[in-house]
Image (cartoon, grey):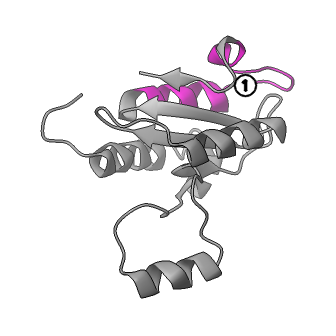
């Protein structure tokens, strides 16, 4: 863990890397953050829930098919944060749907996953994929 950095800092680092790599992999332009976290007042939280915000949705999605997957989802963690029950349920469901869904602690493992994902040929899977229902990379 990097002292003084937050999960938001780690996520910004991933997004900045994706921007830098768009010339190599143009699909990286379409990676996006799902802003489910953060503190909100009760009225705003209720409105967002009515609009479709769901607990457990991973932080980042890349809607680009690669290998045997139809898209990539990354739940980014920092420090001692753990996967919640809702996140666990969502990640497992995404994998059953043919998506690649991983948990990464810090920016570097997330960048490694994205790089490996973008290099996949049809039918291939991520090397970490066979290790668990959804990989947790530190």
The x, y position of residue 132, in whole percent, is: 66, 17
Disc 1 packing (10 Å; few <14; some 14–19; many ≥20): some
**Horizontal arrangement in the rendering, residue 48 relative to residue 99 (left or right):** left
The x, y position of residue 43, in whole percent, is: 44, 87
Q: Residue at x 63, y 82 (%)?
A: 50
Membership of 128 in magenta stretch: yes
Q: Residue at x 54, y 45 (%)?
A: 23
The C terminus - image quarter: top left
**Horizontal arrangement in the rendering, residue 95 relative to residue 43 (left or right):** right
The x, y position of residue 52, in whole percent, is: 65, 74
Membership of 77 in magenta stretch: no
Of residues 90 and 126, the one drawn nearer to the viewer in this rendering: 90
Range of residues picked out in magenta: 109-130
Compared with 16, 134 (above or below) is above
Prevailing secondary structure of the magenta residues: helix
Residue 20: name its quadrant: top left
Q: Residue at x 38, y 28 (%)?
A: 108
| Labels in figure, total | 1
Q: Which residue is mark 1?
A: 120
């Amino acid at each position: 863990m990097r002292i003084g950095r937050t999960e938001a800092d780690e996520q910004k680092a991933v997004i900045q890397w994706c921007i830098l790599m768009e010339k190599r992999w143009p699909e990286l332009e379409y990676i996006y953050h799902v802003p489910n976290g953060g503190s909100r007042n009760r009225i705003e939280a209720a409105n967002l829930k009515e609009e479709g915000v769901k607990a457990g949705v991973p932080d980042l999605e890349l809607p680009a098919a690669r290998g045997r997957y139809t898209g990539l989802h990354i739940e980014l963690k920092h420090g001692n944060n753990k996967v919640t029950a809702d996140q666990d349920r969502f990640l497992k469901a995404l994998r059953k749907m043919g998506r690649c869904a991983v948990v990464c602690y810090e920016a570097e493992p997330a960048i490694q996953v994205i790089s490996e994902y973008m290099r996949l040929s049809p039918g291939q899977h991520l090397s970490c994929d066979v290790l668990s229902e959804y990989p947790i990379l530190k």
